[in-house]
Amino acid sequence: MLSTRQNLLRVMPAKGDPMLRDRSAIPLVVLIRRVLLLGVLALAGAACGGDAASTSVPLSSGGAAITEAPAPAEPVGPVTLITHDSFWVSEGTLAAFTEATGIEVVHQTAGDTGQMVASSILTVGDPLGDVMFGVDNTFLQRALDAGLFEAYESPALAGVHPELVLDPRHRVTPVDFGDVCANYWIDRFDDDLPVPTTLDDLADPAYAGMLVVQNPETSSPGLAFLLATIAEYGDGWEDYWAALRANDVVVTAGWEDAYYGEFVSGGGERPIVISYASSPPAEVIYADPPVDTPPTGVITDTCFRQVEFAGILAGTEKRAAAELLVDFLLSPTFQEDIPLNMFVFPALATAELPQAFVDFVELADDPHVLDPADIEAHRNDWTERWTEIVLR
């Protein structure tokens, strides 16, 4: 399974470049330490951040109360962060953590999300790193069932959108989110053929031969779109895909083959493709020659929300340093670095967004979601049945 945005990041180069809960619930030494850390990181973010609008992520904010925990011992030595291959941050971002704490971050990649989770399960209790970033809601239950993570409730969760907190035991911490949605090429639609607005429209004969999707067995956005249809139609999802097949849907192995092959953006003929809500601003940011507005739009009724998490790996010998690194991943320094590098949205409600995201991203008001436990229980059956319906 390809990790979220893996193909997008290969094609589109990345740009270089105090939220605390009820204080009475936090031991004084922990409170002082984290106030100092978050304060330094906020200042570092102001010093090294790029151009950003004074508009934060358009979701509600809030969070649950933190539980009391003993003060951690002083961290010693480097802390190892394991991520999927699509992890990317600006130069100097992880160095800001080191400057604030004195702890070096060693970054290791472990393939796509599925590979990262599978390999980590083999070393549960004796991990190859201390913190893992990039487990999303499509693989979350598998990681939790395997006991990959130790519980940790960061004080910074007070500033995170509460709907992103999917594990009430806080074995993982939400870091970012993004929507996988049908994108369309604006100039291919007009009064005679209006832009489709629903999942139903994509199966309408009026839009025959226009849609390209990715195989859910080999592509993260392909899986997300399949999950969107299951969330929308329940047991009727099989009939829906049979209708898409009859409507001449094209299937590619991955995002790049779809977006830069069959879709109009890459010279193809199909004006509708499964991509991301952040694809329109990417079209502007990386346009050559430059453009003022994106040539693409998003059909928000089709969106499935993906959430990416970080967690402290069970058995780490550097628990204190791992906690501080998780806190850092929710700091303004890291959160405001996310959009233009990984083309997703920060989990921190107060994080400022780049102007291109403010101007050109439309997030779904009510995105499709599924319980991670349901995804884990049925993923293989769903993808096998999808293959029988669409590729037979």
Image: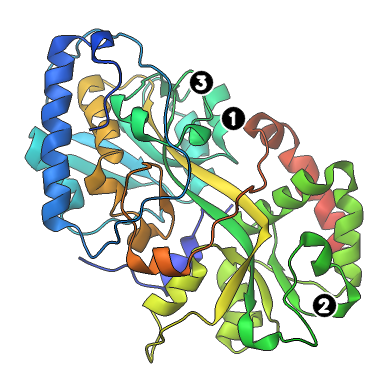
* 83, above or below 387, in the image: above
Name the residue carrying label 1: 141
* CA neighbours of label 1 inside 10 A, class few (<14), some (14 to 19), many (20+): many
- Which corner quadrant holds the C terminus? bottom right
Whether pointer 1 and pointer 2 mark residues with C-beta atoms closer than 8 Å, the reply is no
Query: Which residue in the protein does label 3 denote?
Result: 168
Q: Amino acid at mark 2?
A: Tyr
For label 2, the residue is 207
Q: Is residue 218 above or below residue 256?
A: above
Residue 288, percent across and down? 39, 89
* Relative vertical location of residue 177 with respect to residue 211 in this rendering, above or below: above
Query: Left or right: where does residue 3 sit relative to residue 347?
Result: right
Q: Is residue 363 left or right of residue 372?
A: left
Q: Mark 3 packing: few (<14 Cα in 10 Å), some, or many (20+)?
A: few
Q: Is residue 249 left or right of residue 312?
A: right
- Dots 3 and 2: beta carbons under 8 Å? no
Q: Position of residue 291 (x, y in %)?
A: 41, 87
- Residue at the location (40% across, 73% down)? 12
Give the quarter of the image for residue 370.
Answer: top right
